[in-house]
Image (spheres, rainbow, N blue to C red):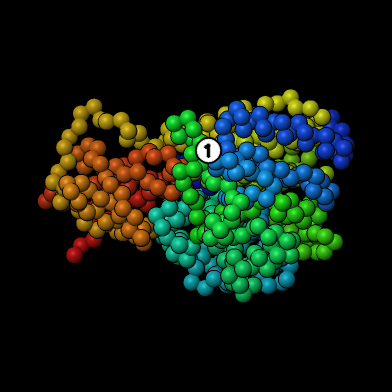
Amino acid sequence: MLRLGCFAVIYVFLSSACAAHAAEPPLTRERVKAAVPALEKLINDTLSATGVPGMAIAIVHEGEVIHVGGYGVREAGKPAKVNSETVFLMASVSKPLATTVISSVVGDGKVDWDDRVTDRLPGFQMSNPYVTREVTLRDFLCHRSGLPSQAGDLLEDIGYDRAAILHRLRFEKPASSFRSAYAYTNFGFTAAAEAAARAAGQPWEELCETKLYKPLGMSSTSSRYADFVKRDNRALIHVKRDGTWQPRFTRDADAQAPAGGVSSNAVDMAKWMILQLDEGKFGGKQIVDAKALAETHRPQMISGFQAADNHVSLYGLGWGVSNTKGRVIWRHSGAFFIGERTEVALLPAGKLGIITFSNGAPTGLPEAINDSFFELVLNGELKSDWVKIWNGRFDQLVAMMVGQTTDFTRKPAEQSPAQKLKSYTGTYTNDYFGDAQISESEGKLILKLGPKKLAFPMPHYNRDVFTYVPEGESSGGLGRPSGVTFTVAADGQAMQVVIENLNETGQGTFVRKQK
């Protein structure tokens, strides 16, 4: 089952388009600057048409910041405007930032891309002893470890921290053989970053500051959610409900900070794009080793293929890499489906880059703005409606995801009553997810999950099937109920329960603990 979650697996599904076309004129400074007014008009028109609260962009070319700007508001219904210093959550755009940091550690000679993770993180395990022994930083950073897509994300949703999730990956069944297939995993990526941090002798969050944020003067950038919350000038995340954009959720991604937990703004990210396009240099200084950084841009795995236009999507180390109409493009998208979208896109041959932030999701606006910018620069005019194209793709994707889950909002044609509620109560256990506690309160069942025992009411659906509404990023904030199905033995006591949204890889069965 596809899941609403932090974005790049989605990008593989969608990324058949880029606005680099044939017969392109030289990529001059004049053409870059000339594209900005039209792009700003498009952004303002798009905000008006979609109602998305706010956006920001940064554009760099040949080592200089061409434009930074903010548009709309930080919170729907409030007057505070987005500007170039407004801090947004980065989601998966954190990944190329992370591999920039790791490149610096590689350049120092303290770790290598092909170092085995267990040499740096003793005690780390995968389900297969051979994979445990052989999996490297490179394997995790290009998503070829054999873990299923989004492994660990559901553990984060129910309250496990980074250390607990990395420990529990040993119970995650593989989706493919080792190094044979691409499957996007935030916590595999996080394991590699933790290994690099251990080699460098610093916690990950401090390593990012030491190796990247402070040297570049990225004073509004952090890998800690607490720092984001402290910013006065920050953009809240929004989802669309009942026709309006609302800041209904928060998103603390500290557990997966290397993969999705960075916050930053247009001013800071412009500096980082310049470093990326200038082989690790900024302000005349070599901040990150050029050879190590170049390795992040080298394709490692095929991440997607669309036969309709022979478009191949490739993945490097924290970067999506493609070649369209003869131009290499490095890009990465970020999304929290509970309210945030970001995308960075770089044309290295032209030393041109753009990043777009948005505080509303799910939409395709960052990709649409970036592709529109490239088309304006490379062709001199905008012929494609990229907003319509990309929003259409996101609508299609969300519809597909929703369509692959059971619709428990529809009552069964013939509803059978539940058995006595005490038949279902008790503690059920699962190696991967831990315990699920089922209790009765005021004539209703309550489900408790995770280390914090997050409590969810369980309305009855039919016979031995109940439902609950999952929370967290993986649910997309849609408020859709998920099934909780009990298997009741002949003695009238439930012996196991399957929780649908936790069962996408077949690991959602919890067995009753015997007293």
Could you say which is closer to the camera, residue 235 or residue 213? 235
Residue located farthest toward the front when viewing the structure as drawn: 79
Can see residue 11? no
Please provide percent x and percent y for residue 194: 57, 66
* Quarter holding residue 74: top right
Could you tell me which quadrant the C terminus lies in? bottom left
Could you say which is closer to the camera, residue 369 or residue 115? 369
Please provide percent x and percent y for residue 90: 60, 50
* Quarter holding residue 363: top right
Residue located farthest toward the bottom when viewing the structure as drawn: 201
| Left-right relation of 505 to 352 | left
Instruction: Tell me which residue sits at (79%, 38%) in the image.
Output: 326
Instruction: Tell me which residue sits at (49%, 33%) in the image.
Output: 244
Q: Classify 10 Å Cα crowding around label 1: few (below 14), some (14-19), many (20 and above).
A: few
| Left-right relation of 197 to 455 | right
Instruction: Tell me which residue sits at (51%, 65%) in the image.
Output: 132
Residue located farthest toward the left when viewing the structure as drawn: 491
Could you say which is closer to the camera, residue 484 or residue 514? 484
Up the image or down, 195 lies above or below 301; here it is: below
Residue behind mark 1: 77
Amino acid, disc 1: Gly
| Left-right relation of 402 to 87 | left
Could you tell me which quadrant the N terminus lies in? top left
Please provide percent x and percent y for residue 263: 60, 54
Instruction: Tell me which residue sits at (53%, 53%) in the image.
Output: 185
Can see residue 75? yes
